[in-house]
């Protein structure tokens, strides 16, 4: 049924009538966000082919059918989809190409990377292409190949800062530290000085509240450029840059100041202890300082050897609140006077001890309650490690006692736990066997043939017989398949086969492998907990869901891709 609707959408999305196109795009967008949607591969192939064809002239920015078709099929990372994207890539709209590249990078296939390198280089040379920097970050060899052929574009307005981000990723990877230093150093120095002048327009009046309530996006872009430039100074250092780092540690922005401090620590350059203490105590950068020092194996320099957990809890709640979606366009929340009021110790879903802090904070002259945690006590009483569950429901602090706030916390936690444990995050049942499809298709072909040539008494019994066999097989399999399911329910992987059910906790899985016929699930003892036929799932989708639902585990299972 879904296939018929999608084919209708594909037809309407090419309509000369813009109203029909926008309706088709809206319907496609709705289906994209429908949970558990499964689509036949032939329909996905047709959508890819259609996306590579010519469309009516656009009437607005939204009017981009090629992009919406590719955005839809990229949610189905099957080999046939990958093959189709590569085959028809050149015909896509630029935005559709950008979306396809993001999905193709996720394949981590060397052969595909070779093709992508050529395609990305070509796009950079010929289009104002938005480079998927975040998706490229894990692949420094690919980044280097792209930069080798396009580095001159660093002097263009469109590509400049995307290239600096790529350079930072390449240098940070350790593949080639100081890549093309003779070219990058003078460019970096010039661009940093220009951007510093933009920053200095803010520095005199700087306050954290202004950043999040008044300046917002106009300032965030300047801040990120400054941090990126300063980070690159670690790899393209000179004495002139040393002077700039000293000055940056005097700026009022805590993030820029802390970034400069880290470069000085890495390069063994002098810095004031008061700068480190100030950054470690600041509500915006406290966590940044702790984890940055830990990453550099310099945790001993952290100036708060004791009591860091409650201190970091304030930063955690602050960042949670300022990153909440805006309730109204242009209005961003800003918490002040965050205070630790109490704490509770409990367990997470896996029985591990954790701690949450009850805090209060002011916003627009009203004091609210919030929670930060849970901190993993297995790693120590003052650990910074946490299973993040920080939140606020903006319940007024004075509306309840501390004990009532705690009771509300446990009630909310129990409700969320119950909802999670019973939520079906993935479900798949076996498809019809080839035998059933064979008899059904054979019957259809013969009925069509007889309809054109005229029915005869000799062939009619045969047609009725194969139709009956095909329908009986399909009905039998459909009835059985209703009771055959593979599901991810809460924290469990469940196999249902009639009245028999096999279950294993996701945290109890050591590995998942598959062969031509079966998917095998192993427990921590490396024993097969259970197996099921490969045709019960679309393995590509099953793989994605298993990776998503095990990425938080400390001992993540191996999932064969």
Image (spheres, grey):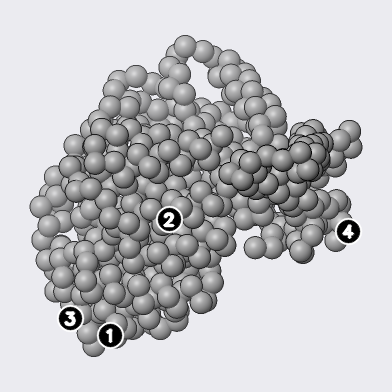
Q: Which mark is residue 48?
A: 2
Q: How far apart are marks 4 and 2 (CA)?
A: 42 Å
* Residues tagged 3 and 4 counted as in contact (Cβ below 8 A): no
Q: How far apart are marks 3 and 4 (CA)?
A: 59 Å
The percent position of residue 66, horizontal first and vertical second, equals 33, 51
Q: How far apart are marks 4 and 1 (CA)?
A: 53 Å
Disc 3 crowd rating (10 Å Cα; few below 14, some 14-19, many 20+) is: few
The residue furthest top is 399
Give the quadrant of residue 469: top right
Q: Name the residue under label 1.
A: 181
- The label nearer to you, 3 versus 4, is 4
SS assignment at label 3: helix
- The label nearer to you, 1 versus 2, is 2
Front-lying residue, 129 or 374: 129
Position of residue 260 in the picture relative to residue 488 (left or right) = left
Q: Which mark is residue 171?
A: none
Q: Mark 3 points at which residue?
A: 186
The percent position of residue 205, horizontal first and vertical second, equals 14, 45
Front-lying residue, 409 or 67: 67
Total marks shown come to 4
Quadrant into which the N terminus falls: top right
């Amino acid at each position: 049924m879904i296939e018929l609707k999608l084919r209708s959408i594909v037809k309407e999305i090419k309509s000369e009538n813009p109203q029909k196109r926008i309706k088709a795009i809206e319907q496609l967008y709705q289906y994209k966000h429908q949970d558990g949607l499964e689509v036949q591969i032939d329909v996905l192939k047709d959508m890819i082919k259609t996306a590579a064809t010519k469309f009516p002239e656009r009437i607005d920015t939204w009017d981009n059918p090629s992009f919406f078709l590719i955005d839809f099929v990229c949610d189905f990372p099957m080999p046939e989809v990958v093959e189709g994207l590569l085959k028809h890539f050149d015909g896509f709209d630029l935005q559709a190409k950008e979306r396809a590249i993001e999905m193709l990078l996720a394949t981590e296939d060397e052969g595909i990377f070779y093709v992508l390198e050529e395609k990305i280089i070509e796009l950079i040379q010929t289009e104002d292409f938005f480079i998927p920097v975040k998706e490229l970050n894990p692949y420094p060899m690919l980044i280097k190949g792209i930069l080798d052929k396009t580095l001159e574009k660093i002097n263009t307005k469109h590509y400049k800062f995307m290239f600096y981000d790529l350079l930072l990723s390449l240098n940070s990877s350790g593949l080639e530290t100081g890549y093309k230093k003779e070219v990058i150093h003078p460019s970096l120095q010039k661009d940093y000085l220009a951007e510093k002048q933009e920053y200095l327009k803010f520095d005199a009046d700087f306050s954290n509240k202004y950043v999040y309530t008044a300046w917002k996006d106009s300032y965030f872009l300047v801040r990120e450029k400054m941090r990126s430039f300063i980070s690159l100074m670690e790899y393209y250092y000179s004495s002139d840059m040393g002077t700039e780092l000293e000055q940056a540690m005097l700026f009022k922005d805590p993030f820029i100041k802390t970034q400069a401090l880290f470069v000085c620590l890495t390069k063994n350059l002098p810095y004031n202890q008061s700068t480190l203490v100030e950054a470690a105590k600041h509500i915006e950068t406290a966590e940044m300082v702790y984890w940055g020092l830990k990453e550099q194996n310099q945790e001993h320099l952290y100036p708060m050897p004791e009591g860091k957990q409650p201190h970091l809890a304030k930063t955690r709640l602050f960042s949670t609140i300022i990153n909440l979606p805006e309730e109204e366009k242009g209005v961003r929340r800003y918490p002040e006077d965050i205070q630790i009021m109490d704490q509770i110790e409990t367990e997470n879903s896996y029985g591990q001890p954790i701690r949450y802090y009850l805090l209060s904070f002011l916003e627009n002259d009203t004091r609210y309650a919030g929670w930060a945690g849970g901190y993993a006590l297995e790693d120590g009483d003052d650990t910074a490690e946490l299973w993040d569950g920080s939140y606020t429901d903006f319940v007024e602090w004075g509306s309840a006692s501390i004990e009532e706030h705690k009771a509300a916390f446990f009630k909310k936690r129990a409700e969320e736990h119950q909802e999670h444990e019973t939520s079906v995050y993935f479900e798949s049942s076996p498809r019809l066997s080839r035998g059933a499809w064979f008899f059904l298709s054979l019957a259809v072909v013969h009925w069509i043939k007889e309809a054109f040539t005229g029915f005869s008494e000799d062939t009619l019994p045969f047609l009725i017989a194969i139709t009956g066999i095909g329908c009986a097989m399909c009905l039998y399999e459909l009835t059985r398949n209703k009771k055959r399911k593979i599901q991810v329910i809460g924290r469990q992987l469940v196999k249902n086969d009639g009245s028999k059910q096999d279950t294993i906790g996701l945290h109890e899985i050591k590995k998942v492998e598959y062969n031509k016929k079966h998917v095998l699930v192993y427990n921590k003892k490396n024993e097969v907990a259970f197996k099921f036929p490969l045709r019960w799932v679309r393995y590509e989708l099953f793989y994605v869901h298993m990776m998503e639902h095990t990425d938080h585990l400390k001992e993540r299972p191996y999932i064969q891709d």
